[in-house]
Amino acid sequence: NTIEFTGALHATVVEQVHLKNPSRKTLKYKAILVGRDGDDFSLPKGNIVTIAPMGQTCINVEFISRFLRPAEAMLLLISKTVGGIGGATLTFSLKSEVKHIESANILKCKSPCYEL
């Protein structure tokens, strides 16, 4: 699965990953961001995810673009055993694209074009 982050340069973009637990046991995951641009992505609610039995939850993933080139990383959800029950390891590809650049400031200058 690929999650795409699209926005302006230096903007913060938030995307959600929806997780469901079809079992009758609680699932617990540790989320890790890895890859070339893993530092540009973050998990604002922490890296431990708990999903109640027969329940669902969402993970917010934030991205702040620092460069014009596309950023790439992987979100790994590694199962932690709860009462002898563990889930499968989940992986998501994270990719970004800068669609436009917004100016930070506009400076107006006045000067003569030519002096003798």
Image (cartoon, grey):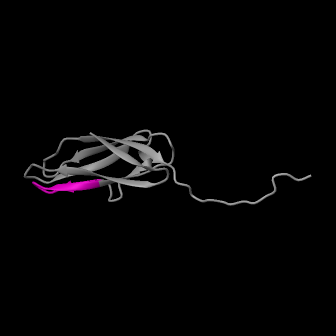
In the displayed structure image, the side of residue 115 where residue 51 appears, left or right? left
Q: What x and y, as percent, mark residue 29? A: 24, 50
In the rendered structure, the answer to whether residue 43 lies left or right of residue 17 reads right
Is residue 52 rendered magenta in the image? yes
Residue at the extreme left of the image, as rendered: 24
**Residue 40 colored magenta?**
no
* Point 68% across, 60% down: residue: 108
Dominant secondary structure of the residues highlighted in magenta in the image = strand
The boundaries of the magenta stretch are 48-59
Q: Nearer the viewer, residue 67 or 26?
A: 67
Q: x%, y% of residue 27?
A: 17, 51
Give coordinates of residue 18: x percent, y percent: 22, 51
Q: Position of residue 104 (x, y in %)?
A: 57, 58
Residue drawn at 13 percent across, 48 percent down: 84
Locate residue 111: give its quadrant: bottom right
Say above or below: 46 vs 73.
below
Count of marks placed on residues = 0
| Quadrant containing the N terminus in the rendered view | top left
Residue at point 30%, 49% (across, down): 31
The picture quadrant where one finds residue 87 is top left
